């Protein structure tokens, strides 16, 4: 269906005082169908055309006949719409060309810009001395410390400033004793929440309310942190650890 006939149907509907909803009720159709007719998207079938002619009390020829003035107006509007689309497309193409030209100019400017000078910072190793200076005891050329077996190594406690003592004289601290973890902190509470959520979902279908259990995870760790800050809980935990250590030592002695 062309635009002229669609506009003719809309004019007849308005002249007879029908709205799109009212006309759709009279024809037993939806409002969207009447709106599509007047937008020239689908054409009404022959049954609907006859029903429209009977409702408007006109013949099919009068229903579908378009006056020359309306046809000229529709043709002029279509031409203007096409020209505006072409104008917008040309403006978009010009803007794209201008942006490409600016990008090329920026790339050329960046390529012609002089390279920034590089700054080199020399860092000397500890105990390094220039070649002109003499090497003290305990220090080899290029700042390399003398090994304990080399003749330049100084005895412990008598190394002059700037020299490195032998490795055997440096005290090595023993590794820290690993502290046992708090059972509340090591308890996999998030995993327990996930298991409960899956059981509630698969067994009872409580997928929607069961997700609330995940909101208890931060509350659980808040309670654990509060208990860890309690001195009485710390004393009880230390007592349990002492008892466990004594039982382990007694079991090892019995095994021996």
Image (cartoon, helix red, strand yellow):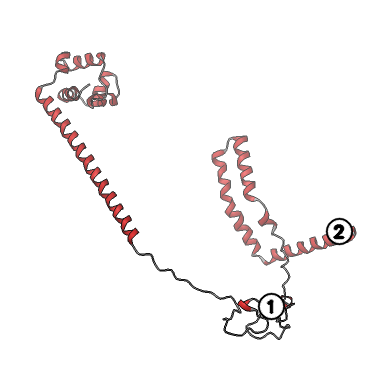
Q: Nearer the viewer, mark 1 or mark 2?
A: 1
Q: Quadrant of residue 133?
A: bottom right
Asked which secondary structure carries label 2, the reply is helix
Residue 121 x, y percent position in the rendering: 49, 73
Residue 211 x, y percent position in the rendering: 56, 43
In the picture, the disc for residue 146 is 1
In the picture, the disc for residue 117 is none
Q: Residue at x 66, y 77 (%)?
A: 145
Q: Earlier in the sequence, mark 1 or mark 2?
A: 1
19 shown above or below 49: below
Asked which secondary structure carries label 1, the reply is loop
Position of the N terminus, as image quadrant, is top left
Q: Which residue is mark 2?
A: 251
User: From this viewpoint, which residue is outermost toward the front?
Assistant: 132
Residue 21 in sight here: no
Q: Residue at x 40, y 69 (%)?
A: 117
């Amino acid at each position: 269906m062309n635009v002229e006939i669609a506009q003719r149907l809309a004019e007849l509907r308005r002249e007879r005082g029908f709205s799109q909803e009212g006309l759709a009720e009279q024809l037993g159709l939806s409002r969207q169908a009447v709106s599509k007719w007047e937008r020239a998207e689908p054409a009404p079938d022959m049954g609907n055309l006859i029903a429209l002619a009977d409702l408007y009390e006109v013949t099919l020829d009068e229903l579908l006949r378009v006056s020359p003035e309306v046809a000229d107006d529709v043709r002029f509007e279509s031409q203007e719409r096409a020209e505006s689309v072409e104008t917008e497309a040309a403006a978009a193409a010009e803007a794209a060309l201008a942006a490409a030209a600016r990008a090329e100019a920026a790339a050329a400017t960046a390529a012609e810009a002089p390279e920034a000078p590089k700054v080199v910072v020399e860092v000397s190793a500890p105990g390094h001395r220039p070649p002109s200076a003499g090497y003290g005891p305990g220090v080899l050329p290029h700042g390399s410390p003398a090994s304990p077996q080399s003749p330049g190594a100084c005895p412990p406690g008598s190394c002059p400033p700037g020299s490195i003592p032998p490795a055997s004289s440096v005290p090595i601290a023993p590794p820290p004793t690993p502290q046992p973890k708090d059972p509340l902190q090591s308890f996999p509470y998030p995993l327990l929440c996930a298991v409960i959520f899956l059981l509630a979902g698969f067994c009872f279908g409580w997928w929607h309310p069961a997700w609330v259990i995940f909101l208890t995870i931060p509350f659980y760790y808040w309670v654990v942190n509060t208990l860890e800050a309690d001195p009485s809980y710390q004393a009880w935990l230390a007592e349990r650890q002492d008892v466990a250590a004594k039982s382990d030592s007694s079991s090892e002695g019995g095994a021996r």
